[in-house]
Amino acid sequence: MFGGTGFLGRRIVRHLRSRGFPVRIASRHPDLGDRQFGPDDPQLQSIQADIQDERSVADALAGAYGVVNAVSLYVEHGQETFHSAHVESAQRVAAQAHRAGVDRLIHISGIGADAASPSRYIRKRGEGELAVRAAFVEALFIRPAVMFGPDDAFLNTILTLLRRLPIYPMFGRGATRLQPAYVEDVAEAIGQIMQRAETPSTIFELGGPRVYSYEEFLRVVAHQAGLAPRLIPIPFAVWHALAWASEILPSPLLTRNQVELMQIDTVSSPEVPGFVELGITPHSVEAILQKMLPNSG
């Protein structure tokens, strides 16, 4: 399990263990896995591995039945780029998995992954899928929509800003469409796919039960929280300028890549298998918000 200590990855680990799979979490900081999961499960192992090093990846894969690569990067830092994380490292895991005789490789990508996209993030996601398929022909691809959950950086950030700002600046006119997926549902889907006896190489797109415009989504979240903010459209050109200025800072609050992503719909395709084909009824944002709100903010 690469990326097993992240927002999605640690949930995948739990779902795999609940299905009886022994799990080896490969990360640069194995002590983080030990802290998250505790030392009491003999079928759960945290090992040190560097996904950018071939020998390290090969050692992590030794004797494995299946591999999940949930490594992701949303903000580039120096040598850690979208290309290094989503293309080079993804290809390295796939190639070493094939060489090790691994039966099943599940690669986590994202809805909209497209090697021809003008967005560098989405383009590198698409290039990564192509690189993985070339190295491991029978690889399975999971494309989640934007994910939410109690400890996310998505809903919680929106809730914090809605509470603090009487006037909420929207990206553009709030028309971008999104289909948020509950992170536990995505992890459950991956557990199911790993356990299936036969799963031909395919792509699964995992979107939640409802498609919102960005404005609708903000109003739903605000309503659930008992808030009534004034939503103000801000042109994307302004956001790009703010992001450019923010990127001068050591830890930018906003990047141009993030602004680009807010201009692109992230909605699952009806022609691509998803939650329905896996027999999973996805949880709605509203249902999870009701559980989150007493503990949020």
Image (cartoon, grey):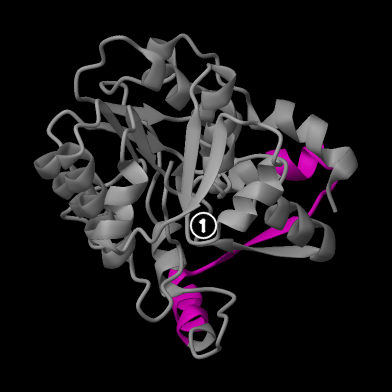
Relative side of 7 to 288, left or right: left
Between 270 and 297, the residue placed more toward the observer is: 297
Instruction: Please identify the quarter of the rendering in which residue 270 is found.
Output: top left
At a point 61% along the width and 49% down the height, the residue shown is 33
Q: Which residues are magenta?
A: 220-244
The spot of residue 252 in percent (x, y) is 55, 80
At a point 38% along the width and 20% down the height, the residue shown is 193
The spot of residue 182 in percent (x, y) is 59, 32
- Vertical placement of residue 175 versus 140, above or below: below
Between 255 and 2, the residue placed more toward the observer is: 2
Can residue 289 be seen in this snapshot?
Answer: yes
At a point 28% along the width and 46% down the height, the residue shown is 113
Q: Which residue is mark 1?
A: 173
**What kind of residue is marked 1?**
Arg
Inspect the magenta stretch and tell me whether residue 36 lies in it. no
Between 59 and 11, the residue placed more toward the observer is: 59
Relative side of 5 to 128, left or right: right
Can residue 8 be seen in this snapshot?
Answer: no
Instruction: Please identify the quarter of the rendering in which residue 119 is found.
Output: bottom left
Relative side of 279 to 182, left or right: left
The spot of residue 195 in percent (x, y) is 40, 15
Instruction: Please identify the quarter of the rendering in which residue 85 is found.
Output: bottom left
Between 98 and 190, the residue placed more toward the observer is: 98
Q: Residue furthest right?
A: 294
- Vertical placement of residue 61 versus 242, above or below: above
Judged from the image, the secondary structure of the residue bearing numbered disc 1 is loop
- Vertical placement of residue 28 versus 108, above or below: below
Relative side of 146 to 34, left or right: left
At a point 63% along the width and 26% down the height, the residue shown is 284
The spot of residue 135 in percent (x, y) is 12, 43
Q: Residues within 10 Å of mark 1 (few under 14, many from 20)?
A: some
Inspect the magenta stretch and tell me whether residue 227 lies in it. yes
